Image (tube, rainbow, N blue to C red):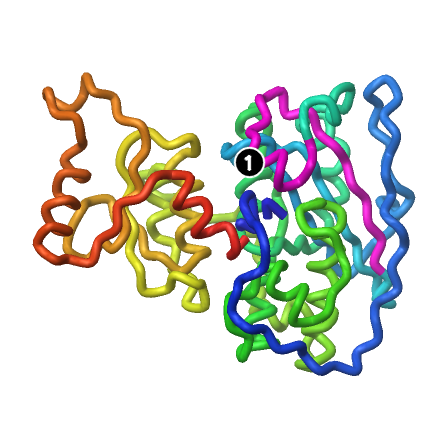
Amino acid sequence: MFGFFRRIFGTAPPSAPVTKASSSVPPPKVDRVFEPVVEAARFQAPDFFEMDHRFVVVDVETANSGNHSICQIGIAAVSGEGIIRTASFLVDPCEPFADFNIRLHGIDAMKVRGHLRFADILQNVRPFLERHIVVQHSNFDKGAFDAAARAAVLPCLNCRWIDSVAIARHAWPELRGGHGLANLKNYLALEFTHHDAGEDARAAAEVVLRAESVTGRDVVDLAGFSSRSDSVRAPQRKRASQFERSLLLEPDPEGAHFGETVCFTGRLSMDRETASLLATVAGMEVKTAMSRKVTYLVVGDQDLTLLDGEMKSSKHRRAEELAAAGHPVTIIGESEFVQMVAEEC
């Protein structure tokens, strides 16, 4: 997953010591990944799309910091017998690939050349996904699917979504350093290639099966899930912006930067919603205004025509004043922020 952040960003596992979990749970039976061959950009559905499954896991990778720029989709379907069947689809995002993302997952413009676009894949996977409970490892994947659907002027998936990060927290509350796939890989001795969407989807499926085994509870019970579709919401008089909604996200209390507060200024390469989502996964609270509560100010590019003759934004100047007065605020650039939160994805 790119993945939370799942996962658009993520590097090595956290440096905090990790103790391997002791478990007698046998490894799940896994069918090898179905890798469709692109022939004249035709969609080839794997055989298991015709079957019904207990739950399905979805993971995506993106071409750049825009969460709509999906370049790979991984799907892992878990049968009633615990067999995991996986499929992986390369996607042409019709967008530039960022160097950071290429280094992360190894996918570039040449690899997706000739593959289907997201809109074409969505219409083929929609019936399969919408008749199942869909698991994601962090909330990034649903956000990416929704953003890509909106960009293609298509309806978002009408699925019942479950976050396997929350399930992992129930099963292994003692784990420090967060419950991202990178940390769980070490803790549970999982074998997979991180930031390959098919591999990450399979790994998240294994995490859920392990959690069910150690807790004696099934995936629906662990998630505290309602049968009500995630897409069914009560009507609101005023629709909040995506960024305003992202501010309602609670910081992950087990994130490596829990207790820190971040504020953004200037133009980032990612939108504010994505930046806020990354911050909350890492445990940080997000504020829109610079104050004494803020411990990190992330500075992007500035449009000097909007600064009334100043070279820095008012938030930047206020942060420097607070730092000079002894307040523990750190001013960093976007790349430093990405490196800070990467391990949580």
Residue on which the image places disc 1: 100
Residue 21 location, quadrant: bottom right
Position of residue 79 in the picture relative to residue 343 (left or right): right
Can you give x and y, in whole percent of width and height, for residue 337 in the image? 39, 45
Task: Please say whether residue 236 is one of the residues in the magenta stretch.
Answer: no
Instruction: Name the residue at 82% across, 20% down.
Output: 41
Task: Please say whether residue 101 is one of the residues in the magenta stretch.
Answer: yes
Which amino acid is tagged 1? Phe
Q: Is residue 305 above or below residue 146?
A: above
Q: Is residue 181 above or below residue 336?
A: below
Instruction: Name the residue at 70% across, 53% down.
Output: 57
Can residue 149 be seen in this snapshot? no
Q: Which residues are magenta?
A: 84-107
Question: Is 107 in front, or is 235?
Answer: 107
Question: SS class of the residue under badge 1?
Answer: helix
Can you give x and y, in whole percent of width and height, for residue 170 in the image? 57, 75
Position of residue 149 in the picture relative to residue 312 (left or right): right
Can you give x and y, in whole percent of width and height, for residue 285 in the image? 32, 56
Can you give x and y, in whole percent of width and height, for residue 17 in the image? 55, 73
Q: Is residue 1 above or below residue 79?
A: above
Instruction: Name the residue at 85% across, 47% down.
Output: 33
Position of residue 300 in the picture relative to residue 189 (left or right): left
Mark 1 is surrounded, within 10 Å at the Cα level, by few (under 14), some (14 to 19) or many (20 or more) other residues, namely: some
Can residue 34 be seen in this snapshot? yes
